[in-house]
Image: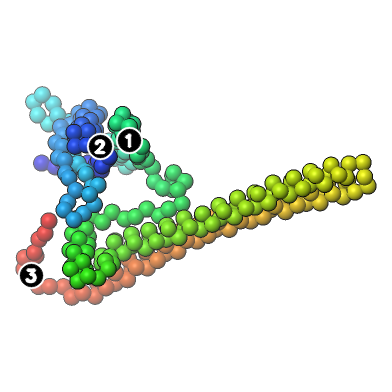
Amino acid sequence: MTAREYVLALPAELNAKDREDLARSFASAVVERYGVAADVALHAPSAGGDDRNYHAHILTTTREVEPDGLGKKTRILDAAKTGGPEIESLRELWAMQCNEALERHQKPARLDHRSYERQGVDEMPTMHLGPTSTTMERKHKAEQERKGEPYKPQTFKAQENERRRTLNDHVREMVRELAATVREVAEQARNAKKSAVHALLRAVGGQRREEEAELARQAAESLRREDERKEALRKQGLKEARERAVWEAKERMTNIAKKVQQVPTRGPGRARGGR
């Protein structure tokens, strides 16, 4: 029978009972919303992996459950017009349930279902490795540790994530430097304003009053333009960094695709499977 799967990342800050209650609460909401049956499976982190990777797999029927069996299909999640908004609504529901549970248990962590771009965060998100890449990386890491060599990512996704993390660190450092520059400029502006005020007070009633007032105005205007210039440079730098990262990722994917096409195909026979 065909089923629909929901994969939930459970907050590691909660204990096992609270994580189970949270997963079942979401499954109950899905059952109530779509009239389907649901099965919940809880998973702990795998050995050698991220010890925070508590997650749940929820399988639901694709048809409504009626007294005498399965009824009509629930197509709202599949239709082009309704699928996107409905999935967004489910993500928002999950984030709300997680945040309520974290708040109830006095945990500071919070979830946001929106993308970095929608949140206004100038960072590139990392890629989901998936089971195949994760298994390969764990074996490679263990082998490197046995050899006493530093671990370096082996798969494309892991290498890309490492590159994106490095780029994000670089962008954050740029932002910190720009913030320090803005604070310095702001301090200079405050000092300039104080100096201008003092100069104006000294010049009250004198012939240089208008001249010093004009100088103060020009200084403030110059500082304002400098602030705008630095902000424009910051935004341009972030934009170029993101564009460069996207271009490099596309280039690498193209090269990998070309290499895959050049690999000779094997003859008929059974392929070895894996998990």
Q: Which of marks 1 and 2 is nearer the N terminus?
A: 2
Name the residue tied to disc 3: 268
Q: Which residue is drawn at 37% across and 58% down?
A: 165
Q: Quadrant of the C terminus?
A: bottom left
- 3 vs 1, front mark: 1
Above or below, 31 against 124 in this view is above
- Dot 1 amino acid type: Lys
The part of the image, by quadrant, that contains residue 11 is top left
37 sits to left or right of 99: left
Q: What residue type is labelled 2?
A: Leu
Question: In the rendered view, does 139 fall on the left or right side of 169?
Answer: left
Q: Mark 1 points at which residue?
A: 107
Q: Name the residue under label 2.
A: 14
Query: In the rendered image, which quarter is residue 76 located in?
Result: top left
Q: Where is residue 100 in the image (x, y as percent from the top left)?
A: 32, 30
Q: At label 3, which amino acid type do we have?
A: Pro
Q: Do the residues labelled 1 and 2 touch (CB within 8 Å)?
A: yes
Task: Using the image as rendered, state which of residue 125 and residue 206 is in the foreground.
Answer: 206
Relative image position of residue 107 (x, y in whole percent): 32, 35
* Closer to the camera in the image, 256 or 214: 214
Q: Where is residue 258 in the image (x, y as percent from the top left)?
A: 29, 72
